Amino acid sequence: MDHLDYLEAQSIFILREAYKHFGKLGMLWSVGKDSTVLLWLAKKAFFGHCPFPFIHVDTKHKIPEMIEFRDRTAKEYNLDLIVHTNEEALANGMGPEQGRMVCCKALKTEGLQQVVKKYEFEGLILGIRRDEEGSRSKERIFSERNAESEWDYTDQPPELWDQFKTDFKKGNHIRVHPILHWNEVDIWEYIKRENIPVVDLYFAQDGKRYRSLGCAPCTHPIESTASNIDEIIEELKGTKQSERAGRAQDQEMAHAMQKLRKDGYM
Amino acid sequence: MKDIRETLNIVVVGHVDHGKSTLIGRLLYDTDSLPEGAIDKVKQLAKEKGKSFEYAYLLDAFEEEQEQGITIDTTQLQFATDKRDYVIIDAPGHKEFLKNMISGAANAEAAFLLVDANEGVQEQSRRHGYILSLLGVKKVYVIVNKMDLVDYSEERFIKIKDEFETFLNNLNIYPIDYIPISAYFGENITKSSSEMPWNRSGSIIEIMDTIPKEKDLEKKPLRLPIQDVYKFDDRRIIAGRIESGTLNVGDEILISPTNKTTKIKSIAYWADRDKNDTASAGMSVGITVEDEFFNKRGEILSHIEDAPIKSNIFNANVFWMGNKHLIKNKKYKLKLSTKEVECEIITIHKIIDASTLAQGDFSQGIKKNDVAEVTIKTKEMICFDEFSNLQTTGRFVIVDDMNVSGGGIISGIEDSLQNRELVTNSTNIAPRKRLVSTKDREKAYGQKGGVIWLTGLSGSGKNEIATKLEKKLFDLGKKVYYLDSTNLRFGLSSDLEFTPEDAHEQTRRIAEVARLFADSGTIVIVTSVSRYRKDRDMAKSIIGESVYKEVFIEATEDVCKKRNPGGIYEDGDGKFYYEKSDYPVVSVFIEDAEFNADQKASSLVDLVR
């Protein structure tokens, strides 16, 4: 087994554990590279079937290409796709100009909370990775959230030998993180090996490309000439810039992500 | 083409403030693995808070960790040397966060156990050492940090080394090396330090690159715990991760503990590149089998030889992380590979203070952060391995009130008690372990112990055949013993009568005695009417399927009556009635009352081969 085989096998094991343990299970699909890899892994884990719905929390501020890719891929893969928007917040004029942290909380965190409540999800699969950011590096693979979707990072359950937390209070849910152990280069090398379609925004045009995708107003492309996967891998191996450098909400204040995630952000 | 790089997971453990996060921060910095601006960010942070620069802030991402200068939770970071990639796991040193330390250390292939050169070996240095041994992390390196505080003194280094070595060796931990460093000043991190010319071990990075990676898992016995069974389409796919060993399409396999055998028909796949006829340790697979039985999560697939142990009682070492004490006679949930089963602690043998190795008091149960030797009973028979043979199927966790609250490793169970469901009314007992194994005996005696169970109605001729068979095997040089059920009624079973209940109990006792004889390496010949199928099933399950050989001595009513005019039937009612087995047995037909017992016995000699 090589490194990618190992990463894949571990992720599939986690996906199958989640599927076995949670009656109401859903997978968050942000349309970005990580959750698209996760989607591919789910196809592998269940031999071409996707036995749970996919959820896209649409802030209505997403880059149009992402929405186009989402709808096309959902059709191709025959996905059971739930698209949810916090309409109430939008109607009240929520947007980044209200403050990025406030906006993220309303449109993403609260939007997600609404979906969880509506469908009574017990398990939610997410494509976060440890190398993305400090508070994510301290996550568990199966991580409990209370009824308000809050994360108590000061008292996380022990997690040893792939024995995950699968018992929890009614109303709480478990966030499942099957690709926590991957890094950014792993993701691209896997996309290349498996030939997984991803949204074109990642490939450079006019000297710029997106390294991390989010909402249009808060996500900026980086300077890059990497127009194919090989060039992206080459670029990432040489760069010292952090992956989320183009994501404005991270830069807003110290420990921004930790605070967002404590309240239920993905 | 990209070369395939190897990744090694290393955990850094040790007492609080001995410099774990600093060492990791320094490793990242010196290997140029930090993102742009990370150091500036930390400098800025230190300035804002009026503190001096700390590499530890690079890892202690939580605001509370940075404010209080402690590591609360484990984290993992990646970096690379020229040789390979590393995942470095930072584990908290505070006793309060021991469960987080254990979460980190459980995933490691090797460990750096850090000791402060100035403070020397402290409580958590020892406790962490103990926990590493329980988790089965064998590749341990002791890093003596803060050598700058002791003027890079070799004498001080040797003193710490000697002190710690004695403690660790008592735990069967033999550190591969001791390395003196100063993490803060970067001495002995990437290259040998000129401050410590006496050090012959080299720098941390140089040593890391020499740590061998465990590779022989695919050569160990096959263990594929069933994770789930899928029926999404016309295929019925058994899904799971191969924990050890290798399987091939066409292999004959055993499913434990239900003891079903079948063949692997195919390895399922979705993407074309995954099509394969063989799979090995580490892979998450789906297989289809030739005989479609009902399969359950938690069952384990293996090859027929080298199957896992089956039992419902075993000895284990546990460490407890729960807020409520682990107590006897309370129901907990045990999770072992994919099996979940109700369990209870039937015996606590001793509690060890992991930092002093002193024995503790356990009248109140096992408290948080304690390590104990216990005997566990599960509600149903499960399959497992001794941890020292196979780690992944030899360890488990205990769930108390929705939380994973303890972890444990199985120290084993004596051969004669394996592969069966054990019953006991006694408490405070444990299956003991001996130094002579069944395998040792087989080797010494040049034979396998076994049981030839002659069943058939009274008068059918069992006794005559058995005595001849015993003599024949004895003359062949075999270690053999004939266990005559009638003779037992003058001793072991003198309290029993000929009622069906007592006949059942008689069968149980014969089977238990026969099992012990077989386990001692002896070939046992048993004669027992055992007319009911359930009695023989019981005997077979007590003795063990591979050891039990059933021979049905079949005679007509006429023959039986002629040969046994008294008509004493052990099962009481005196009726001519026999329930045949539904699995294949050796049949010996007795044609007439004057049959040739010698000839019949000869035909059975081959059974012991």
Image (cartoon, coloured by chain):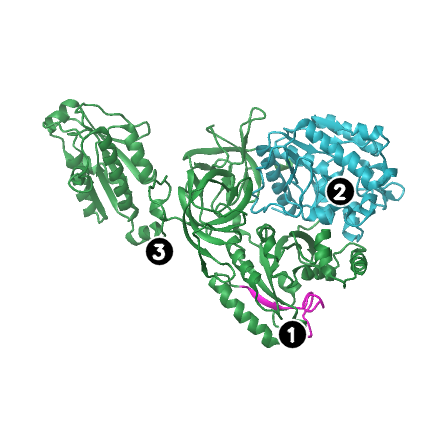
What numbered label is drawn on residue A260?
2
Q: Which amino acid does label 3 sit on?
A: Leu
- Give the chain letter at badge 1: B
- Mark 3 lies on a secondary structure that is loop
The residue nearer to you, when weighing A156 against B407, is A156
Q: Mark 2 to mark 3: distance in Å?
A: 58 Å
Q: Name the residue under label 3.
A: B435
**Which residues are drawn in magenta?**
B175-197
Look at label 1 and name its amino acid: Val
Say the numbered circle drawn on residue B150: 1
Position of residue A133 in the picture relative to residue B431 (left or right): right
Residue B61 visible in image: no
Label 1 close to label 3 by CB (< 8 Å): no
* Image quarter of the C terminus of chain B: top left
- How would you rate the neighbour count of disc 2 (Cα within 10 Å): few for under 14, some for 14-19, many for 20 or more? many
Disc 1 crowd, CA 10 A, few/some/many (<14, 14-19, 20+): some
Of tags 1 and 3, which is closer to the observer? 1
Chain letter, disc 2 residue: A
